[in-house]
Image (cartoon, rainbow, N blue to C red):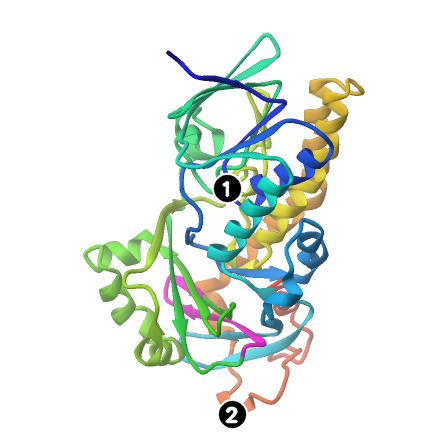
Amino acid sequence: MTVERRYDIVISGGGLAGLSLSILLARTGWKVCVLEKETYPLHKVCGEYISMESWDFLCDLGLPLEKWNLPKIHRFQLTAPNGKFLSAELPLGGFGLSRYKLDAELAVAARKAGVDLYENCKVQDITFENDIHRIKTTLGEFIAPVSCACFGKKSNLDVKWKRSFLSRGSENYVGVKYHIQTPLEPGLIALHNFPGGYCGVSAIEDNRYCFCYLTTSRNLKKNQQSIPAMEEKILKKNPVLKKLLDESLFIFDDPLTIAQISFRKKTQTEKHTIFIGDAAGMITPLCGNGMSMAFHGSKIVSPLINEFLQGKISRLEMEKKYQETWNRQFAGRLRAGRLIQRFFGSAAPRHISQPSSASTRTPKRSLSGRPSGRWRRIATCGW
């Protein structure tokens, strides 16, 4: 027999966007479930830097951030492949927290709020008929008037639905992440360039650091699909990365990886399913506020879903208002991120010419003496 479960809202994907949205909706009295294909706690490829704009929101969701003694990050450093660098203070700053801890704690908070959380539950398809969504999964069928997709960067449904960002082709980026122990300044987040990519390093809980980099699939292919060979021959061209790779203690036996990452423009709704987080639009990692965007997206859509279920607005009004608000909040950030990323791993590093002995200075001007607009954007967008 087919198991069939009925809810007001079914959320596919139990990451940051899905879990935070579920808590907000459950608190308003709706029957909510989250479908997560993995089991908590779990590691994910992520820079694990959160802008301070999300601190109060996470506390309101029930996370005791102050008790966790998390590293506060207030300084940014950018290095070129030759090791020379620029540094600046971050106007807003942020804090470090691993996805391993964050997602698991949000899952606990969701269950406390009354959310039904199904782990090891893979979504196979979502259909819409007669104003009702049917979500087919490995645990049976779920039925709800509202369906939200928070399944991250790329999923089997993106391919099944032939979403437009895939039909235009993919940049084919590869993401790699480690946790390391190394004697670095906990208040610093660094972005290290190497040919064809860049690596972010910042502190997280328990005196560890997130070491996460993005590169093109060409770099991996040139090294026979070997990550160690690629790191040896390409990443280590940057002396700062060479020192980190050679001298740090790596916590993972093997790196976490993700392939076929796309930063192309995405839609926020399809087939009346609402996309939130990376499923709605993914910002380049160098901008460092993708995690905050996931939280912000849940805050945008939750009151609209509430109004729709109360009969105050139609489904089309809910979808239109969400898309308009989402684009007003995030479309500019995503465009800026895509523009800035073009300079990384290629042209940008050649513009860094200050000697490394200038570590006590905070460069604010280009070599011409005029303020560098590109540098201002990089230094203030989160990383």
Q: Callout 1 environment at 10 Å: few (<14), some (14 to 19), or many (20+)?
A: some
The x, y position of residue 114, in whole percent, is 62, 35
Q: Which mark is residue 168?
A: none
Q: Residue at x 24, y 54 (%)?
A: 221
Name the residue nearer the viewer: 177 or 208: 208
The x, y position of residue 253, in whole percent, is 28, 63
The quarter of the picture where the N terminus appears is top left
Residue bounds of the magenta highlight: 186-199
Real-space Cα separation, disc 2 to disc 1, in angstroms: 39 Å
The x, y position of residue 200, in whole percent, is 47, 66
Q: Residue at x 23, y 58 (%)?
A: 222
Q: Which mark is residue 264?
A: 1
- Quarter residue 197 falls in: bottom left
Tally of marks:
2
SS assignment at label 2: helix
Specify the farthest residue to the top.
130
Residue topped by disc 2: 357
Mark earlier in primary sequence (2, 1): 1
- Indicate whether 143 appears above or below 85: above
SS assignment at label 1: loop
Q: Callout 2 environment at 10 Å: few (<14), some (14 to 19), or many (20+)?
A: few
Instruction: Answer whether residue 21 is magenta in the image.
Output: no
Report the amino acid beneath label 2: Ser
